[in-house]
Image (cartoon, rainbow, N blue to C red):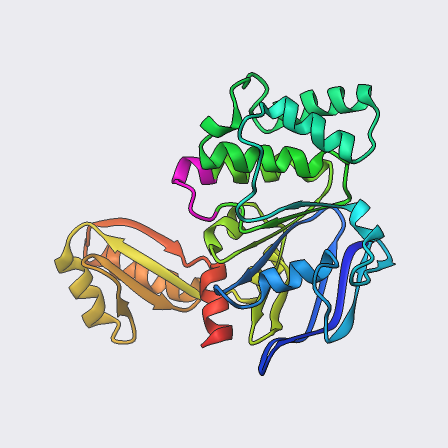
């Protein structure tokens, strides 16, 4: 089942077309990376999914139900974390989740149990200080807990690692991985390394349309090229390889890149062995999302 389906979505602001027939499918149980440059239309798409923007064309379905602007019953299936979540600074995390639960008409017992469960999940179980003293990373983690309070089928996070330090970024990514068993995760970002480290599926937004979409593993497999690199111990050895193999390319002081498969690797290794060249390592070149996306948008 697909928890989110977007078909031919159009959105214009004045004379600027932001979304130009966007089609996207988010499979249930996935961690889905929604990638695009700053200003590409990721937030516009998410606000349309939430029923907060009126599209100029197209259809959106959440858990099989059509999304309608201004009428948001489909939002009962969604938990949402904006890029900069706001809180009542004088409250503690538990007080804040208590308020959110009451606004959702949850029963008191359920609010308490869910709050404790989720605060433990996001690493704030022992935190009783006022939110005003929280770091940005702590606020993001509390935002995830709040978004999950109603047990949504889809958790939408708008650039959740934006402006975080490396430790804060890693903490948020770990939280998103841990909630996968509970809900489908859709998060927008322009940081490809975040997508590559935790996502099962990804879509690239470019020019108002989805330029590439699919399972991360399948996209990387389809884009795999027959390339490998030899890293030598000294620069002179790299020079000898370049002289012997004119089609090779130097990458740095001691690394040489080659095109070709198994036969080519054995040829290079035979030359290295015959000439007793000091080799540090030889390895196949891995296809990265960055290289795939660079080909699509160039």
Q: Is residue 164 on the magenta stretch?
A: yes
- Picture coordinates of residue 143, whole percent (x, y): 60, 37
Please tell me which residue lies in front, 199 or 145: 145
- Picture coordinates of residue 5, whole percent (x, y): 77, 62
Tell me if residue 225 can be seen: no
Instruction: From the viewer's perspective, tell me whether residue 267 is left or right of residue 200.
Output: left
Please tell me which residue lies in front, 144 or 241: 144
Tell me if residue 196 can be seen: yes
- Which stretch did the figure color magenta? 162-169
Residue that protrudes farthest toward the left in the picture = 236
Instruction: From the viewer's perspective, tell me whether residue 63 is left or right of residue 247.
Output: right
Please tell me which residue lies in front, 253 or 147: 147
Instruction: From the viewer's perspective, tell me whether residue 173 is left or right of residue 45.
Output: left
Residue that protrudes farthest toward the right in the picture = 65
Number of disc labels: 0
Instruction: From the viewer's perspective, tell me whether residue 291 is left or right of residue 15.
Output: left
Q: Residue at x 46, y 51 (%)?
A: 193
- Picture coordinates of residue 2, whole percent (x, y): 79, 55
Location of residue 246 by image quarter: bottom left
Q: Residue at x 52, y 28 (%)?
A: 131
Q: Residue at x 78, y 49 (%)?
A: 75
Q: Quadrant of the C terminus?
A: bottom left
22 is higher (above) or lower (below) than 214: below
- Picture coordinates of residue 102, whole percent (x, y): 77, 30
Q: Is residue 124 on the magenta stretch?
A: no
């Amino acid at each position: 089942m697909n928890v989110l389906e977007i078909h031919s979505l159009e959105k214009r602001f004045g004379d600027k077309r932001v979304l130009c027939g966007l089609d996207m499918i988010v499979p249930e149980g996935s961690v889905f990376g929604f990638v695009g440059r700053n200003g590409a239309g990721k937030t516009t798409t998410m606000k349309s999914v939430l029923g907060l923007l009126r599209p100029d064309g197209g259809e959106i379905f959440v858990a099989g139900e059509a999304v309608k602007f201004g009428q948001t019953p489909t939002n009962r299936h969604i938990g949402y974390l904006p890029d900069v979540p706001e809180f009542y600074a004088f409250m503690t995390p538990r007080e804040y989740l208590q308020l959110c639960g009451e606004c959702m008409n949850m029963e008191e017992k359920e609010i308490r149990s869910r709050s404790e469960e989720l605060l433990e999940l996001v690493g704030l179980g022992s935190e009783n200080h006022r939110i005003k003293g929280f770091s940005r990373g702590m606020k993001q983690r509390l935002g995830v807990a709040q978004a999950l309070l109603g047990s949504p089928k889809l958790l939408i996070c708008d650039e959740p690692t934006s402006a975080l330090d490396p430790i804060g970024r890693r903490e948020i990514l770990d939280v998103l991985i841990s909630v996968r068993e509970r809900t489908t995760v859709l998060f927008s970002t322009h940081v490809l390394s975040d997508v590559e480290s935790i996502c099962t599926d990804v879509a690239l937004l470019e020019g108002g349309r989805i330029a590439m979409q699919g399972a991360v593993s399948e996209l990387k497999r389809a884009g795999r090229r027959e390339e490998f690199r030899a890293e030598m111990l000294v620069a002179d050895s790299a020079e000898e390889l370049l002289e012997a193999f004119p089609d090779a390319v130097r990458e740095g002081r001691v690394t040489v890149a080659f095109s070709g498969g198994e036969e080519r690797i054995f040829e290079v290794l035979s030359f290295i062995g015959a000439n007793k060249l000091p080799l540090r390592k030889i390895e196949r070149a891995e296809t990265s999302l960055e290289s795939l996306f660079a080909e699509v948008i160039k």
